[in-house]
Amino acid sequence: DQQVKQNSPSLSVQEGRISILNCDYTNSMFDYFLWYKKYPAEGPTFLISISSIKDKNEDGRFTVFLNKSAKHLSLHIVPSQPGDSAVYFCAASARGATNKLIFGTGTLLAVQP
Amino acid sequence: KAGVTQTPRYLIKTRGQQVTLSCSPISGHRSVSWYQQTPGQGLQFLFEYFSETQRNKGNFPGRFSGRQFSNSRSEMNVSTLELGDSALYLCASSASTSGGSYEQYFGPGTRLTVT
């Protein structure tokens, strides 16, 4: 039972344009959501998070949007840079198990120069 | 501040053996979680330790165990290794205490190969 889903295995965008990565979840108990970036054979790098009491959080080029009614979140990267090319994972945790992250399957982002 | 460190980085073991992996969290972080990444199952939560106690547990067999020491360093052990245990094992630390949500910071991982 995949509680966190990233339906796009890959995404290709041009440098300078916007990258939009999507994530859906099924568990209504999730109340904290995170995005991580990962290179092969390395640990995930934390990018940005959002609590369920908010619908938007911004940090530099990264913005995360949360739509609780649709159980959907998205990560916007503007402007995209070649160094952003990596696998992006969304993750979620539930109240009472805040460090038990449930990860999506990841989206490979390729930013073309 | 130094990041999360994991040792060893690479390990090759034979089926039936056991293995112990080590993790040192970011200074001041008391929560340590372990994850397994495989091509087939993705990133899966193993367990979390806080103040030397297991606080959360994932859906893995009892062959997978862990512990945490008073300095917050953690070890995980896998006994009777199977071929399917070949994976990248990741440790993450968090400033989380008894409540609230905090981001987790990951180490570089230990690549375990079982032959």
Image: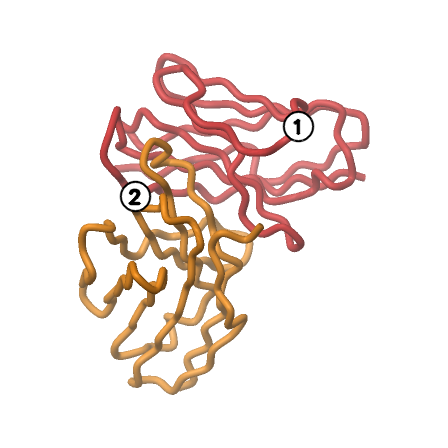
Chain colours: A orange, B red
Q: Earlier in the sequence, mark 2 or mark 1?
A: 1
Image quadrant assignment for residue B111: top right
Name which residue lies at 23% across and 49% down. A51
Q: Judge the density around disc 2: few (<14), some (14-19), many (≥20) Cα neighbours within 10 Å.
A: many
Looking at the picture, which amino acid does disc 2 mark? Glu
Q: Are marks 2 and 1 in contact (CB under 8 Å)?
A: no
Q: Is A62 rendered above or below residue B51?
A: below
Mark 2, residue position: B103
Side of A101 where B113 appears, left or right: right
Q: Position of residue A102 (x, y in %)?
A: 46, 46
Image quadrant assignment for residue A23: bottom left
Residue B61 - label: 1
Image quadrant assignment for residue B1: top left
Q: Position of residue B74 (x, y in %)?
A: 46, 23
Side of A87 where B9 appears, left or right: right
Q: Position of residue A89 (x, y in %)?
A: 44, 58
Residue A17 - label: none
Name which residue lies at 62% across and 40% down. B10
